[in-house]
Image (tube, rainbow, N blue to C red):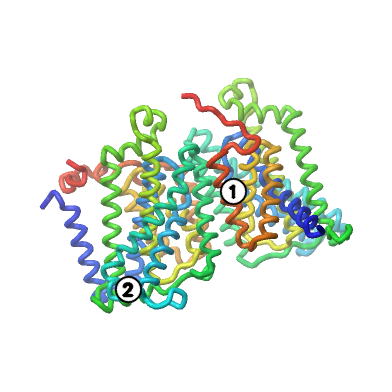
Amino acid sequence: MDTLFQNILNALQWGSFYALIALGYTLVYGVLLLINFAHGDIFMVGAYIGFFVAHFLLGTYAFKLPTALSPPLIFVLTILATMALTALVGVTLERVAYRPLRRRGAPRLYVVITALMCGLLLENGNLALLGASRRSFPTLIPPTVYDLGGVLVTNVKILVIIATIVVFFFLETVVRKTKLGMAMRAISYDRMAVPLMGIPVDRVIVFTFVLGSSMAALGGVLFASAYPVLEPYMGALIGWKAFIAAVIGGIGEIRGAFVGGFLLGFVEIFVAAFFPSTLRDLIAFSILLVFLSFRPTGFFGVARATKI
Amino acid sequence: MRRHLGLWLYLAFSLVILAVCHYQALTAYAQLVLMFIGINIILSSSLNLINGYMGEFSCGHAGFMAVGAYVSSILNVWLFTSHKVFGPPVLSPSSAVYLFPVTLLAGACAAALAGLLVAFPSFRTRGDYLAIITLAVNYIVKSSVENIQVIGGARGFMGMRKVIEEMEAVWRIPWIMFWILVFTGLTVWVLHRFVSSSYGKGIVAIRDDEIAAEIMGVDTRRMKVAAFMLSSGMAGLAGGLFAHILGYINPGTFTIMKSTEVMVMVYLGGMGSLSGSVLSAVVFTLILEVLRPLQVIKWVVIPLLLILLMLLRPEGIMGNRELTDVFPGLHRWFSAHKGV
């Protein structure tokens, strides 16, 4: 019984990571109908930026801050600064690679190739710049383990799950209640009519990338706090898994990203509990294959009819 | 004589290469590069059938390559050599000389069957979703191989060297180079005949407008199955040959990186241009060899190259033209190839 609860908790944590990353896929897809394959690597970039920001604030580098900050404050500042900086990376990517293609009206295939290559570029650029040695993320929140009737809970785990739930309600409000959210939904509904209504399409798209990338950055810092090992390829596989989560939930739907993320988390943790854990990736990708073959729109997605 | 000039030229070229290799006039390294060029030609021209002619986006070519590589290697090791898992040879080792192409083709067939994994979902999905399916298949293949301990799992599989040695014991010629030359020529010829046949034109019709093609009487489903099976089968062939060059394969070779390499070759050469694929496979392999000392930088340069290509010249070097369109004079010499 205890292991069951322990597994459920682990699944919730992994599901949170998947959900946070899946959001970025889903937001961009909802607006642009583009699968931003570089998003998993934005997550990786987020974790690395978090690493440098945290070390900067801790005063490990030559430059010292005038006053020493308390660790919880550093953690909060790290998250905020990382979210801002990573959003900048995401927007740069959009500006340099995707926007010129969109302006020219290039076929979507070219955009997909570009996105895939941007991801590889981020991974290997990082590898070339910073070297292959792994880095360990500094411990900002001193780990505390609570024992709830035999189930062990760390404070990081609770933080991750709570942060994800907060993000869910925040994004639902943004997309459903604000003007920008309405513009985002409008663009995905009719790309041609929206500019005619005086909505600044490019600004909305930039905003979408800011949202998606900063959520990936949040995920990156939280992930690095829970599993403090950074390496350039850390975003590749988790990015793909998050994408699977987005597809299962129905890509383009925020609810879908969360449901898909938690579902994938549960499946993976419980597969690893009963089968050899090397089968985890195999099963995750097989689920994707089956889902795409039989229900490409996922749980919440609506099939788009193509007019001839 | 002139009608088959291309064939004769290729035969003469192959004989020269074989003779040069046989008398050790080329260094082992130069021979290796030549073999990789041949394999890359097979890979890029077969992927061009899907990504260029059919206008789909398949980024899991390395997965099919892995299927072909493993199936043909295992068959060869099981049949012709004594192996600590598969036991003593089943057939006499010297029969490898005749049966090597058969096992290679068996690997290709297995890869073609794996291609069905992609072909069936492609009925309902297109574009980026199909791209993910191909990618998932690549991961699934790699992950399954890693989980099968009998064939070495993540440690890899070896012993194919002995098969080549058995063949060389019967008749001392550079066997692996011989088969690469044969199958490279065969692949390019088959693909050329296929895409210029009236049946094969259906593939280009699917690229231009799937619904219109369906209405005009192209059986799009059958066409897709045929194209995916042919393409992945040829990737399997390339994988089988690749496995026998070094005599060692491991699942880490057949990752998305490998698929990307092939994709770069296709897009560099031009979507829907067979001669472009051949040309870019040659150029790209040579570039890779030049960049080899810069291990990590290489993988920064390749994606950057493709991004720039998409931004500046998305149609590639050749566009969808063939060499004979650029130099019409060639028509006179290769008229047989144009089916005239």
Label 1 crowd bin: few (<14), some (14–19), many (20+), radius 10 Å: some
Specify the quadrant of the image occupied by residue B158.
bottom left
Image location (x, y in percent) of residue B182: 26, 61
Q: Residue at x 39, y 57 (%)?
A: B236
Q: How many marks?
A: 2
Whether the residues at callouts 1 and 2 have beta carbons within 8 Å, the answer is no
Labels 1 and 2 positioned on one and the same chain? no
| CA separation in Å, label 1 and label 2 | 41 Å
Give the left or right position of residue B41, taking residue B261 as reference. Answer: left
Image location (x, y in percent) of residue B312: 45, 42
Three-letter amino acid code of the residue under disc 1: Ile
Q: Nearer the viewer, residue B6 or B59?
A: B59
Residue that extends furthest to the top in the rendered view of this protein:
A197
Residue hosting label 2: B91
Question: Is residue A67 visible to the viewer in this orientation of the structure?
Answer: no
Classify mark 2: helix, strand or loop.
loop
Q: Residue at x 12, y 50 (%)?
A: B2
Label 2 crowd bin: few (<14), some (14–19), many (20+), radius 10 Å: few
